Image: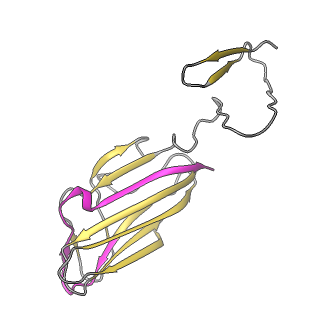
Amino acid sequence: MPLILQGATSGSTTIQATDAVTQTITLPNNSGTILTTANTFGAGTGPAFRANRATSQTLANVTWTKIQYNVENFDTANCYDPSTNYRFTPTVAGYYNIQGQITIDGTDGTAVGLRISFNGAEVLANFFTTSSGDYGAVTASDLIYFNGTTDYVEIFGWQSSGTSKTLIAAGTLNTFSGAMVRSA
């Protein structure tokens, strides 16, 4: 079987198949990286998104409220819904890093919580208690396996000020993102 090697100035070499027959290449060791056209998705090429909340949203006192991240900064595979369910449903099975952040006006002693919810169930929750009138900002992140068809993730916020509070109306203070880190 003849092989054609095509070099590039980037330092990579492409092996071009000369026919449609299945071919095997044996390498002297297993170090380095081998990419084939059969590797449709790998880390770096799977779905990724980032969204934010551009306007304020009210959080009731001691009630989990779904955060409506309504502005997409990017969505590489059209897997985030910024207008109806405000959830990420990746279409490729694999492991994803999911991150959320919310920020409310501070009140001394107010606890602020953020929950990552996977298929309607809590996966992770994180809390922060404000002091001296500071903003109440809380983040959470986790590595989650998605089946690539029906699994989805959402972010919920919570606060304990004794009254309703609103998210700070600035996109950089209220974000939701996810990216594939490894295929299944």
> How many marks are shown on the rendered structure?
0
Horizontal arrangement in the rendering, residue 29 relative to residue 10 (left or right): right
Relative vertical location of residue 22 with respect to residue 35 in this rendering, above or below: above
Residue 7 in the image: state x and y as whole percent.
62, 17
Residue 66 occupies quadrant: bottom left
Relative vertical location of residue 87 with respect to residue 157 in this rendering, above or below: above
Q: Nearer the viewer, residue 138 or 60?
A: 138
Residue 155 in the image: state x and y as whole percent.
37, 65
Residue occupying image coordinates x 25% and y 69%: 103
Residue 130 shows in this picture? yes
Residue 88 in the image: state x and y as whole percent.
42, 54
Residue 63 occupies quadrant: bottom left
Residue 80 shows in this picture? no
Relative vertical location of residue 93 with respect to residue 107 in this rendering, above or below: above
Q: Nearer the viewer, residue 122 or 35?
A: 35
Residue occupying image coordinates x 58% and y 51%: 94
Query: Which stretch did the figure color magenta?
Result: 157-184
Horizontal arrangement in the rendering, residue 103 relative to residue 184 (left or right): left
Residue occupying image coordinates x 72% and y 40%: 31
Residue 172 in the image: state x and y as whole percent.
25, 57
Q: Is residue 92 magenta?
A: no
Q: Is residue 164 magenta?
A: yes
Residue 3 occupies quadrant: top right
| Figure colour scheme | secondary structure
Horizontal arrangement in the rendering, residue 97 relative to residue 38 (left or right): left
The N terminus, quarter of image:
top right
